[in-house]
Amino acid sequence: MGDIHNPKLLYLKGALFVALGLLTSALIIMDHPSWRLVALLPITIWAFARAYYFAFYVVQHYVDDGFKFAGLLSFLRYLLKRPKSQ
């Protein structure tokens, strides 16, 4: 299967990720209802989203423009194999 190029399908994919995140967040909160969890869950999601952004966009555009990612495992391999002088 190749990459998706149709903008409508890409928006649908993004909307499905948002729906999945909202659904799972609601299920977690329903399973363990507390204001503390309601406050900590979005902070956790935001922090991981920023880490993902850093791992790819920031490294690719500001640290090493030769780095092209294919997922988190390729980023970990990059971290382990890059020259130590960077």
Image: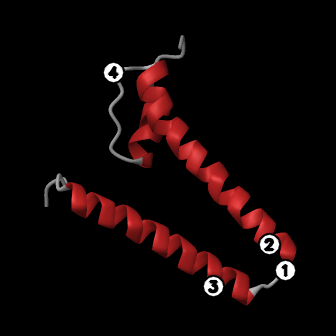
Residue extending farthest bottom: 31
Q: Identify the mark nearer the N-term, 4 or 1.
A: 1
Disc marking residue 27? 3
Measure the C-alpha gap from mark 4 to mark 2.
40 Å
Q: Are marks 2 and 1 in contact (CB under 8 Å)?
A: yes
Q: Identify the mark nearer the N-term, 1 or 3.
A: 3
Q: Mark 4 sits on what residue?
A: 66
Residue extending farthest top: 85
Q: x, y percentage for residue 54? A: 54, 36
- Tell me which corner region of the image, top left, top right, bottom left or bottom right, holds residue 39: bottom right
Measure the C-alpha gap from mark 1 to mark 3.
13 Å
Q: Nearer the viewer, mark 4 or mark 2?
A: 2
Measure the C-alpha gap from mark 2 to mark 3.
12 Å
Left or right: 22, with 2 as reference point? right
Left or right: 13, with 81 as reference point? left
Amino acid on which disc 1 is placed: Ser
Q: Nearer the viewer, mark 4 or mark 3?
A: 3
Measure the C-alpha gap from mark 2 to mark 1.
5 Å
Q: Mark 1 sits on what residue?
A: 34
Disc marking residue 37? 2
Amino acid on which disc 2 is placed: Leu
Q: Secondary structure at mark 1?
A: loop
Q: Is residue 47 above or below residue 44?
A: above
* Front one among 82 and 59: 59
Q: Secondary structure at mark 3?
A: helix
Q: x, y percentage for residue 81? A: 44, 27
Residue at image point 72% right, 88% down? 31
Residue extending farthest front: 8
Left or right: 36, with 43 as reference point? right
Measure the C-alpha gap from mark 4 to mark 1.
45 Å
Q: Identify the mark nearer the N-term, 4 or 2.
A: 2
